[in-house]
Image: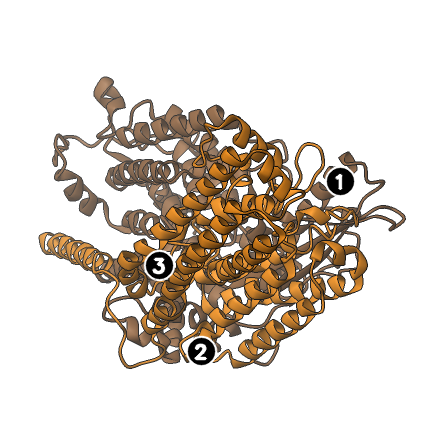
Chain colours: A brown, B orange
Amino acid sequence: MTGTKTVRLTTPVSIAPLVTFRITFGLLMFVSLLRFWWRGWVTDVYVLPEFHFTYQGFEWVKPLGNTGMHILFLIVLAASLMIAAGFLYRLAAVAFFLGFTYIELIDVTTYLNHYYFISLVAFIMIWLPANRRYAVDVLLKPAGRRTEVPAWCIGILIFQISIVYIFAGLAKVNSDWLLDAQPMRTWLPAKTHLPVVGPWMYAPWVAYLFSWFGAIYDLFIVFFLLNRRMRPYAYAVVLLFHVATAIFFPGIGMFPYVMMTASLVFFSGEFHERLLGYLPGYSLKPGEGTAYKYSRQKIFLAAMAIYMILQILIPLRFLLYPGHLFWHEEGYRFSWRVMLMEKAGTAYFTVKDAHHREQYVVNNAEFLTPLQEKMMSTQPDMILKYAHHLATEYKKRGVNQPEVYGEIYVALNGQRSRLFVDSLVNLAAQPVSWKHYTWVLSYKKLAQ
Amino acid sequence: MKKISLAAFFAVVLATVFFACSKSGGGDGGPEPGQGFDKSAMLASYADNLIIPGYAALQQQLAGLKTASDAFLAAPSPATQATLKQAYTATHLQYERVAAFQFGPAESALLDLFVNFSGGLDYNFNTSGELTGFSTDSVTIEQNITAGGYNLAAMTRASFYSQGFPALNYLYFGPNAIARLNANPVKRKQYINDVLARFKSLADKVASDWTGYRASFVSNTKTDVGSPIGNMINQFAYQMDLLKGPRIGWPFGKQSNGTVFASKCEAYFAGISMALAVENITSLKKIYTGGGSGKGMSNYLAALGKQSLNNDVTAQFDLVLEKLKAIPDPLSASLVNNAAAVEAAYKEIQKLLTLLKTDVPSATGVQITFMDNDGD
């Protein structure tokens, strides 16, 4: 049993899917980062804010200033083009992974699932021989040219994409999504401007259709993509689904394009051979096949097994926490929960001195950007980090042992807003930790 | 077989791309007939009943203000000053009725910055610890008058604080206004007329731009950032933020451990801050309810099945207005003499702000964010 599996994982297969993946990934990242820059977000998000919500364990990651951030973006932009071209590929992949991940680790408020996906894929790409065909590297050094790679090199990418879909699907199996069609029921009536379908957006059954179709799609699309006969039809559904999400929810940015492109890796080697055959200089018949061989393949296989186990466990860590996941958001990130809830909040903070003689109402706009304030208002770990920051700031202003109290109102999935945290708890004294935050009030669903 | 599947693959990709392009490039469509709520009709009602007439009325009030100002400048006296105050008050009150329309033409003209600068929400205290808020920069004003050669189009806080209402209410009703006018009549009159002329040209521009802007305003029924509906919902929250902050809460000392900044009330020298605040919220409620046209944001909420939220918002508007009316003008004195009434109003303001900043946007699916998001 183990024997057959190892054989299958190490069997040489065409390198072509990897080459397509490398080129499309590099180009897409280039466009995506350029768009980010062009919209002025490098400055808005990484230069202007005076305070950043760091990730636990990554507090040392700091923005690099105006020039520094733009240089970092330039480096990552160049690296993405070099990945696409297969030029100094290993170096470019390392630079891209480190640069991109560094950028994403600066501020939690910019967290997006597909940024996490890109970081993971970039990490995987470092270890794959994606530059061994149709790349500048083998143009310069033809001896390094290979036409085949071990099957696991493609398999690990398929695994990663499958994780995204299946966990996104599992996340949708909840009563709000399936029984109340929330948040679709809230979001779709805001889409009546769309031509043709617009007028239907007020109808509740359409929200149910979207919800159920979305859940079934996410849960099962991988299995249809894996099936050789169903694959072309399944990919047509992939395109349809993601184009629809791009039209209905333009706010999700590059995510649909990332998934549409990445899912091509499900197609066979022959398919990719012919697809790449349309490119200039890609010979369809590469003569004698040569397979890329890892010198210490067993280490790679073991590392891959550990990686895969982690990828399965990390999205399940929410099970370790009590309380409603959407409300407490403990174990929410890094779990492929995409477009899953409508959550909004308003947060008022008051700083008092140790003897409660002085009292200062905090103006959040003084410390946070509108985006940071919006994200902070609904997520407990950010509320805590901000409260600690306020304590530091007010101490500098001469307040003796500042205590920070939050009066925070949060609305979830079409329900009315209500108090989110215990207003009588001094948040400045609460530790940042991985443990359950008891100062967050528990969630009870209200009648509509 | 393989050739066919590849051909089919390209066909699907092409069809999808075509579908996507035709969708996204297909424009915003016209009025939506039939099903559900007609957002376009709501926007048309706003444009035709509140916004365009609102700016026309502002132009009229400005003409009246100019007449009263001319009379005052020709013969400065307590009597002409009293007449002028009526005209000034009427103009400032009218401005409060259009204050929540800070998008499109008003936004591109930066009307609010140049006419009624609130200090902004993100910068509250200057280097000497003074609240900024609704200040008047009398130093810059006097300098401008003495030295001349001022540029009222300059994009600085000093420039915003030395023109529009902050400047006019100081020049008309500030300390020794009449004596100062008599002391340096030529240059001071010149400055007042320049400020008035700039105000008029900005108001004229916004009013005339709305003629062209109306069509795109009415036909765009999107709800994303920068869309008309998105802008209006955001303005509800913004105006409430101004009320909680620069209009009432900050001068009251909420941010400063009770240190009152009495002179930082809106139109401090005219002493009409509460009248302005009441008018601002009365107008905001009128915008929210659509002025009884049946085509307001409140009707949209009701159409979405959010009637109880809608009832609560309307009731909270009324409660806030009741509490505001319990604070007598001038606010600068009431901040100290009627602190309990101010405190009571502040509490209700915060509740209304929460409803308008969290519940209403959440119920209508309006984004208040400026970046990509994946809904978490």
Does the rendering let one see residue B213? Answer: yes
| Residue A222, label in figure | 3
- Type of residue at label 2? Asn
Q: Residue at x 35, y 37 (%)?
A: A38
Q: What element carries label 1?
A: helix
Residue contact between numbered discs 1 and 2, judged by CB atoms under 8 Å? no
Q: Mark 1 points at which residue?
A: A394
Q: Residue A369 in the image: state x and y as whole percent.
A: 55, 44
Eye-nearest disc, 1 or 2: 2
Q: In this view, does A331 lie to the left or right of A335?
A: right
Label 2 marks a residue whose chain is B
Q: How far apart are marks 3 and 2 (CA)?
A: 44 Å
Label 3 sits on what residue type? Answer: Val
Check disc 2 and report the residue beneath it.
Answer: B299
Q: Which is more N-terminal, label 1 or label 3? A: 3
Pick out the residue farthest to the front.
Answer: B75
Q: Is mark 3 on a helix, strand or loop?
A: helix
Quadrant for residue A72, please give it.
top left
Give above or below for A228 relative to B141: below
Q: Which of marks 3 and 2 is in front?
A: 2
Distance Cα–Cα, label 3 vs label 1 = 52 Å
What residue lies at 22% left-to-right and 57% top-to-bottom?
B20
Foreground residue, B48 or B18? Answer: B48
Using a 10 Å C-alpha cutoff, classify the residue at mark 1 as few (fewer than 14 neighbours), some (14 to 19) or many (20 or more).
many
Is B83 left or right of A282, judged from the image as shown? right
Q: Residue at 76% across / 49% down in the picture?
A: B260
